[in-house]
Amino acid sequence: MSVSVLGVRHHGPGSARAVRDELQRLRPDVILIEGPPEADALVELAPELEPPVALLAHVPGRPSGAAYWPFATFSPEWQAILYATAHGIPVRFCDLPAAHTLAEDPADDPPAEAAELRVDPIGALARAAGHDDPERWWEDVVEHRGDTPFEVIAEAMAAVREGYQPDERETRREAYMRRTLRATAKAGFERIAVVCGAWHVPALVEPLPPAKADDAVLRGLPKVKPELTWVPWTHGRLAWWSGYGAGVGSPGWYDHLFGAPDRPVERWLARAAAVLRDEGLAVSPAHVIESVRLAQGLATLRGRPLAGLGEVTEAARAVLCEGDDLAVELIQRRLVVGDRLGHVSDRTPMVPLQRDLRDRQRRLRLRPEALDRELNLDLRKPLDLDRSHLLHRLRLLGVAWGTPGESRGKGTFKETWTLRWRPEYDLALIECAALGVTVAGAAAQRARDLAAGEPATLADLTALVERCLLAELPEALPAVLAALSAKAALDADVGHLMAALPAMVRAHRYGDVRGTPAEGLAVIVHSMLDRVCVGLPVAVTGLDDDAAAALLGHVDGVHAAVALLDDSPAEPAGPAEPAGPAEPAGPAGPRRRWLATLHGLSDRPDLHGLIEGRLTRVLLDAGELADAGDRMSRAMSRGHAPARAAAWVEGFLSGGGLLLVHDQRLLSLVDGWLTGLGGDQFVEVLPLLRRTFGGFAVPERRAVGERVRSAGRRAEADETDLDERRAAGAERTVLAILGRAHG
């Protein structure tokens, strides 16, 4: 029997080539690979997968219980798996089972920084060789060569581990590896190949410690029942600490080194030039030739066998990018890290929720991608509407594949999304598997659970109604609306009602625009507005500056929401207390009720200046006031403190400054009030004024300034105008003195 232990670096292209070549030379009859043994049954699927992929181990019902073992094309373990499946050789994982690793308390694990310091054999070997950069040294002696004998690596690791005492977790892992090795030999295999991290090689070669010692270490370990599957991975996530250790920071570069048959530097810089040309930058073949020469020259000066990532990056910066760091960052993002997203086959174990999403992605032609992709939807088109429903449902499930943005088009029929798939979304789908077998069913159940959860605020419930309508979940709406109605009936805080009302109005409007029925929603909207109108007169009493500013935001939100409602009278929803001045007989629409309430409040003498000014502006814009100038004049009279007058101005102008441009009287009132302030008074109100006018758009501020300047010029001209009748006598006298007749 012969045992060959091949020590590798995880995700190392040179190690991957060396493992592939060594297995062809050894021709083993079984291969052991570092990884969770529960995944042995999944190995046969490897030829159907497109790396990067990862083994996912998770504990059902425990969201935090998950671990990943990622594999890329240039991972030595992946090449060993492909060799075994291609030659019909048994392949088994030999690391500590996920049943034990997932049962450990995460708080007991050392931080990644500590682990890196504890198991950094590459750094120790590099220092021994006189190098201060471990990564560059390893690339030179292993990754750029691919022919380093595994015996040399084993000898080097043995020297580094001399006198080293592994911690408890590492001791368990290596004990289980030895147990698996003994069991494999006992099963009758003659030529055994073990592919593991180079650090573990000294623990797996002869002489092995007694089996009883390893059994004692493994006895009584905590245990759970995990489930394992393959999931897509990305190059960007290969840098994670997970599974069997740390990843790499330049997976795209390593993938290129492994896949390039020859002339890797020339091929890499040619790809970099293509990336820049795709962005409209002028890069010629001469640029590529000069950058290759520079990279090779740098490698020679630094004594490297091949130009590494540092040399090709510097050459690209100097020649291809002409010193532009943004262009270098583009190469870094597109090539050095890369945007590759793996793919798993249909035979891969999946929960029904994952399969339903996979089917819908195909039907809706939405392929998951690792880089940001902008998607513009026209909700009048059935395909785009279905896409919108899917993305909103996934957000309810905590799968933020799409992030909504501001639509560039006008109208409520447009939506803009930014799509980016992340590997952890598969775990989120697995965790949501108990909610339903389809995305729609699971999202509806999640909405019902959120509505019944505690504590659920009124604003949370109204937002949930809106999300259900956007996701087209009519089966979830009755439970959510019932919870909302009960919460609204018990919540006496007018601020809560006002904060929740805009979302309810948007939900009501979305129900009309998107064709989503929401029976009972209009009744709740009108009932909430009635309660706001009744409670607002009490809510505006005795406010300080902060409370007035908060209420101002609620008033603006409700006013904008009421504008979206049909102003026809609502169906009666029970008796409502009158909120404003007397109205004509018959029910009034929501807009009339709201404006009547504001009109009744605007004449109260105890209002905070900010609120009074804002109500005056709202009523003026709505065509409900004819005496806005008189109200401003009273607010700025000497009977009011300058701070209150400034607050009134802030509230009045918070809707924008164009009113001052078009209404000369209002501008003159503000200008006269400001110029009449004393020095100390002006300093007192200056912060409020700066905040008020600083909120205007730049063109508005410029237009107001021009109006003030032109008004000043007219005033100066008026002061210098002459009375021609009175000046006529003086004119005749002067002409007589000059000897000229009066003309």
Image (cartoon, rainbow, N blue to C red):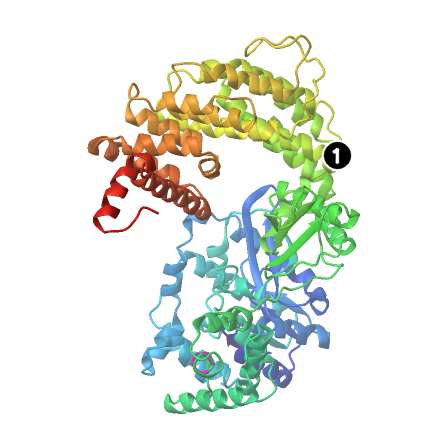
Image location of residue 453, percent across then percent down: 58, 28
Label 1 Cα neighbours within 10 Å, binned few <14 / some 14-19 / many ≥20:
some
Q: Is residue 401 above or below residue 81?
A: above
Q: Is residue 312 magenta?
A: yes
Residue 670, picture quadrant: top left
The residue identified by callout 1 is 516
Q: Is residue 455 visible?
A: no
Query: Which residue is found at the position 34% from the left and 83% from the top?
Result: 129
Image location of residue 120, percent across then percent down: 39, 69
Question: Which is more toward the observer, 458 or 60?
Answer: 458
Type of amino acid under label 1? Thr
Label 1's element? loop
Q: Is residue 165 left or right of residue 143?
A: left
> Magenta segment range?
309-315
Image location of residue 525, percent across then percent down: 64, 23
Q: Is residue 158 magenta?
A: no
Query: Which residue is found at the position 40% from the left and 34% from the top?
Result: 667
Q: Is residue 245 above or below residue 569?
A: below
State the predominant SS element of the stretch in magenta: helix
Question: Which is more toward the observer, 655 or 353?
Answer: 655
Q: Is residue 422 above or below residue 637?
A: below
Residue 68, picture quadrant: bottom right
Q: Is residue 117 left or right of residue 523?
A: left
Image location of residue 660, percent across then percent down: 44, 36
Query: Which residue is found at the position 37% from the left and 88% from the top?
Result: 302
Question: Which is more toward the observer, 270 or 360?
Answer: 270
Q: Is residue 522 visible?
A: yes
